[in-house]
Each structure stands twice: as C-alpha cells, then as structure tokens.
Image: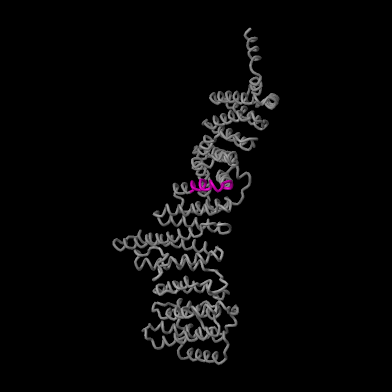
C-alpha cells in the first residue's frame, strides 16, 4: 500500500519536477542522464513560462546537495543549468537567470575550491551569452567582490592557489564582458567596483614581474600558457577592460592603479609601474591619452613631498606615457605638462638647497645622498621635457620654447617667471641651468624656415641677457641653444672641436643662399649676436669647451646668415677679439689670452676659405705658419692640449 501511495505522490508531482529529478542518476558517478536531459530541454523550450520554476527547483536541489557535500550531484545540476541556458533564448529566461546566478553565488561562497572553479566556469559561459534584451535591474556587486577575493587567494597548496586565482580573473573578465557593452548599465565602471577589479588584476600581474622582472608588454603567449599563468591572464583582462573604457569612465579605471602602486610602494623601483602604464597607454583609445597624462600629473602633485626617488619614478612613468602619446593625440594638456614639470623642477631645487643649508649645520652622509637623489629627479624632469618637446610639431614647439624661456629667471623679465625671490644666488643659478638644459633638449632638431621664426625678440633678448653670462656652464648652454636654432643644415657635427682646418671643402658644408628675411634679421639683431660672442670671450672662467662653442657659433653664423656685410662684421669681431687679447685691459689670465688668439686663428682660417679671397687666404695661412714655428701657444692644437 505504501509503495502505491509513493507512486501516486510521484505521479501527482508537477511535470517539470519529475523531469528535473529524472536527469539525476542513482549513482552520481554515472553523470547526467542524457536522454532525460534532452526531454527536460525540449520541455523548457516548448513551455518557456516554466523556466523560472525549473530554475528554482534546480536551485533548491543544488543548495541541498552543497550543504550535504554531495558534490557529484552538484556537478550534474550545474551541467543541466548550463545546457538549459545555452538552449533557451526567450523573454522568460530572465527569472531563470536569477535562479542560475543564485546557484553560482552558492558555489562561489562555498569553501571548496572545486565548487568555486565550477561556479566560475558556469558564470563565464553565461557571460558569453548575448541576451535579447538587457536586464537593467540585475547587479553584479556580489560577483565583483567574490571574484576579486579569489584573485588574492592565499591557499597553502600552490596548485589550488593558482587554480582559484585563475578562476577569479576569468570571473572578472566575464563580469566585464557581460556588463561593459550596455550603455545604460554602467555600474561596472563605478569607483567601488573599479577599486576591487583593477587592484586584483594588478596583484596577479605583479607576480610575473617579481619572478622575471620583465619590463614592457610581453610577447604573445601560447594558449596553454594563458590558461596556466594568472599574470598573463590578468594582463589580458586588464587590456580588455581598458580597451572598453570611454571618455566618461577612463579616470575611474586609471585611478586605482595609482592607489595600488602607492600602497605596495612600487614607484621605487618603478619597473612594474612603467610596465603598467605602457599597457594602459597601448590599450586605451588614442584620443583618451591626455586623460592618463593628466592623471599622472595630478598624482605627481599629490606626491610632491615624497622622497626624491618616488617622484623620479612617477616622472619616468610620465616620460613613458608621453613617449607613446606623442605618436598620436596629446590634446589640450601640452602646456599643463610643461607647467607642472617646471613647477616640480623648482620644488626639487628648493629641496636640494634646503638639504644643503641643513648639511652646513650638521654634515651627514644621508644629506649628500638626498642631494644626489634630487639631481635624479631634476634629470628625469629635463629628460621628459626634452622628449615631449622634441616630439611636438614645430608650431607647438616654438610656443613651448617661449614658455620655458619666460620661466628662466632673467633680470628685467619678471612677467611670467616663477617666483624666484627666495631662491638666493645659488638657487637662481640652479634653476637657470635646469631650464636652459630643458630648452636645449626642446630645441634639438628644430628647423625653422627663417631665423626670425626661430629667434624672435621675446626669446632672443632674455637668452642673450647678461644674467645668463655669469657662469661658464650657463654660457655653454646658451651657445648650444643658439647652435640648435641657427644650424638648419646639420653642419655642426663637422665643426666640432676647435682646430685649424687644412681644407674646408673636405667638410662638404651644406648651405643655401641667404634669404631676404635672414638678411633683415642680421641687420636688426646682428650686433646683439656679435656683442654676445665678444663678451663671452672676455669671461675669466672660460674653459676649452667655451672656446670650442664660440668658434662653432662664429662658423655657423658664417654658413647660415652671412652675406658680404655680415662677413665684414665678422672679420671686425675677430680682429677686435685679437686686440682684446693683446692689449689686455681686462687683465685676463694667460690661458684665456692664448685661447682667444687660437679662436681667432681657427675662425679666420675657416672664414678665409669660405669666402675664397686669395690674398686674404695667403695672409691667414702665412700667419698660422709663423705662429706654428714661433708661437705655437697661439694655435688651438697647442693651447687646448691637456696640461
């Protein structure tokens, strides 16, 4: 009688429950009963309104089996769910999906690694299904939190730890793919989600850095490596996430990177930070590059009181980002980049000087190392300014040259300058040298059509100011900047080193006919250039490099800017220099006087061959021959030898 009652009860049970029960074999090792699964699938497709009940009943069974540790039946239930999901694409699938996600959550919450991986695999399959209509009420907060936690698994068994981390990364990838394409459902980009997703990916990416310290993007790994290596999988997921970022949510994706690098102290050394931002810059859409650069500049401002090495690390990251962005669109951040970098150059000089003042009172080894670290910061800033500037188009580069020049502390030009009032003499000189070094890098390779475009009065006047002649190094930088701007045919390398050139034609000097605009420029500003060269020769602290640069200045002026009038002016300058050395009203040291005589000899030898006036050439050659016998110290080959 009892058996009959049981049969009657079974017959009275709803059909969907009977169909669900039939897919479970007596022994779970036998796996899913395929014939009955086909019946259940057919029933679900034929009666889609029953899908939500099928899902709820499967969820009930799965929950019971998880609690009872009947993992074989759990596997069968999830396999059935996966098959139903793949088969059904109707409107009624929405309630079924809720049951499905509830079951996946149950598996992820369990402490059993196999169930966590099983739940992740099912979620990834679901993420790849394109639903007919998006479900705007559905949220994935739990899955973001859970998958992020799995990415940080610290299981004592390395294999299980690896397996769980891979599952966590794949789960995050699934969440991103499922949510990121729906414009109306932008919850995944909210800061509370990005603050979990991005650090979880970086944490796993960092592991490969720790192992083999690779810098930059990796070579594309094989499929097997991708599956087995959490770091490679995390990097691919990170690239995919960034590639989907848009104008409105770019910053939310980038800011957690800074928090992670700060928290784990990854700016010094900064190999991983550089690698991260290379990945970011290559993954995002090119038009958003300036967003990332702005974020780096903002973070540099936030960390301005940190140790020099941390600041240098951030600046180096900025350099790498700029190097990649320079190939595309940098947008409106050009002046902001330079302004921020110049501000931090000033801050670094301030720190260096304050360290020197404190070391004057108590001499310690740490102070000198701090000063050296500040020099690292300053060099990193100059390198970044130079690289950024040299990659700009000429019209922007000329603006930046003017902008940097306006920041150089020069007497009589305080309109745009930074506040240098409390720097003191030493600080002002340091700032001048740093800014001129930056300017030297920006002007490198700059080719203006006319010299007046390269050296407009607002730029030329402060550059040739007496304020920038008070130091040997300053004068060298000014002359090198002039060389960059005057030398439009790349002749400078042929003129390197001050010497008597036997045959100038061997140098194969390139030159064009002097343009009308250049003639006009020399009429207006020629005397200013001659005066600068003349006064530059008079300075007592000149060394060999100063004389070499002065020779190159005269030679380049001859090649690029000299018509007949200018040639006569240049000869007059040379004779005036020789008179200065002979009469010696300024009481110059003997080395300087001989250096000036050698400079004049080398230049007039070059000039006489360039203008090819036979009598002039013969006279210069005769004087040089007599000097080589009777006064070799008046020739560059002798006076500029070591010792």
Taking the image as shown, residue 580 lies to the left or right of residue 115, namely: left
Spot occupied by residue 250 in the image (x, y as percentages of width and height)? 53, 48
- 96 versus 421 height, above or below: above
- 55 versus 423 height, above or below: above
Q: Quadrant of the N terminus?
A: top right
Residue at the farthest top position: 1
Q: Residue at x 37, y 86 (%)?
A: 585
- 82 versus 612 height, above or below: above
Q: Quadrant of the C terminus?
A: bottom left
User: Which of 525 and 190 lies nearest the eye of the viewer?
Assistant: 525
Q: Principal SS element in the magenta part? A: helix
Q: What are the residue bounds of the magenta stretch?
A: 242-257
User: Which of 332 and 482 lies nearest the eye of the viewer?
Assistant: 332
Residue at the farthest left position: 361
The answer to if 430 sits in the magenta stretch is no
User: Which of 61 and 520 lies nearest the eye of the viewer?
Assistant: 520
Spot occupied by residue 156 in the image (x, y as percentages of width and height)? 49, 37
- 520 versus 216 height, above or below: below
Please name the colour scheme applied to the rendered image.
one colour
Query: In the picture, residue 93 is in which quadrant?
Result: top right
Q: Residue at x 44, y 74 (%)?
A: 464
Spot occupied by residue 177 in the image (x, y as percentages of width and height)? 60, 41
The answer to if 245 sits in the magenta stretch is yes
Spot occupied by residue 351 in the image (x, y as percentages of width and height)? 37, 60
Count of numbered tags: 0
């Amino acid at each position: 009688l009892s058996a009959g009652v049981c049969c009657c009860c079974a017959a009275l049970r709803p059909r969907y429950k009977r169909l669900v029960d039939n897919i479970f074999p007596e022994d779970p090792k036998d796996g899913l009963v395929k014939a009955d699964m086909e019946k259940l699938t057919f029933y679900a497709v034929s009666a889609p309104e029953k899908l939500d009940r099928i899902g709820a009943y499967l969820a009930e069974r799965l929950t019971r089996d998880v609690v009872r540790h009947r993992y074989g039946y759990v596997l069968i239930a999830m396999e059935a769910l996966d098959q139903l999901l793949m088969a059904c694409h109707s409107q009624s699938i929405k309630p079924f999906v809720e049951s499905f996600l509830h079951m996946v959550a149950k598996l992820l919450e369990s402490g059993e690694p196999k169930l966590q991986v099983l739940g992740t695999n099912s979620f990834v399959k679901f993420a790849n299904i394109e639903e007919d209509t998006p479900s705007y009420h559905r949220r994935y907060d739990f899955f973001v939190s859970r998958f992020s936690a799995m990415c940080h698994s610290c299981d004592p068994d390395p294999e299980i730890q690896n397996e769980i981390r891979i599952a966590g990364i794949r789960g995050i990838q699934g969440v991103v793919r499922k949510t990121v394409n729906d414009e109306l459902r932008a919850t995944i980009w909210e800061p509370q989600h990005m603050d979990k997703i991005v650090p979880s990916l970086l944490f796993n990416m960092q592991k490969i850095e720790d192992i083999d310290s690779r810098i930059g993007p990796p070579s594309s790994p094989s499929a097997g490596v991708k599956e087995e290596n959490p770091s490679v999988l995390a990097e691919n997921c990170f690239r995919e996430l960034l590639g989907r970022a848009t104008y409105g949510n770019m910053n939310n994706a980038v800011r957690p990177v800074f928090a992670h690098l700060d928290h784990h102290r990854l700016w010094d050394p900064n190999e991983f930070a550089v690698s991260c931002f290379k990945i970011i810059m290559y993954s995002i859409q090119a038009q958003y590059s300036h967003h990332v650069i702005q974020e780096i500049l903002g973070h540099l401002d936030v960390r301005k009181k940190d140790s020099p090495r941390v600041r240098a690390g951030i600046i180096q990251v900025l350099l790498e980002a700029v190097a990649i962005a320079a190939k595309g669109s940098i947008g409106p951040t050009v002046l902001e980049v330079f302004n921020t970098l110049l501000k931090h150059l000033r801050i670094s000089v301030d720190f260096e000087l304050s360290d020197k003042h404190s070391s004057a009172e108590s001499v310690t080894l740490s102070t000198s190392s701090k000063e050296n670290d500040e020099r690292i910061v300053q060099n990193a800033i100059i390198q970044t300014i130079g690289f950024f500037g040299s990659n700009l188009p000429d019209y922007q580069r000329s603006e930046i040259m003017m902008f940097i020049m306006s920041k150089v502390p020069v007497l009589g030009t305080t309109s745009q300058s930074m506040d240098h009032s409390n720097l003191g003499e030493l600080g002002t000189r340091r700032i001048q040298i740093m800014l001129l070094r930056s300017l030297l890098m920006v002007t490198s390779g700059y080719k203006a059509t006319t010299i007046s475009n390269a050296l407009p009065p607002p730029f030329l006047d402060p550059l040739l100011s007496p304020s920038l002649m008070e130091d040997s190094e300053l004068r060298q930088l000014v002359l090198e900047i002039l060389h960059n701007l005057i030398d439009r045919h790349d002749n400078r390398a042929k003129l390197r080193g001050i010497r008597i050139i036997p045959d100038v034609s061997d140098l194969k000097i390139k030159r064009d006919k002097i343009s009308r605009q250049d003639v006009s420029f020399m009429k207006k500003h020629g005397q200013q250039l001659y005066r600068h060269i003349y006064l530059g020769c008079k300075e007592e602290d000149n060394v060999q490099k100063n004389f070499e640069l002065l020779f190159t200045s005269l030679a380049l002026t001859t090649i690029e800017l000299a018509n007949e009038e200018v040639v006569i002016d240049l000869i007059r300058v040379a004779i005036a220099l020789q008179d200065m050395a002979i009469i010696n009203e300024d009481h110059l040291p003997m080395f300087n006087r001989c250096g000036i005589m050698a400079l004049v000899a080398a230049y007039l030898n070059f000039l006489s061959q360039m203008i090819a006036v036979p009598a002039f050439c013969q006279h210069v050659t005769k004087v040089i021959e007599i000097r080589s016998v009777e006064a070799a110290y008046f020739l560059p080959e002798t006076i500029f030898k070591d010792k």
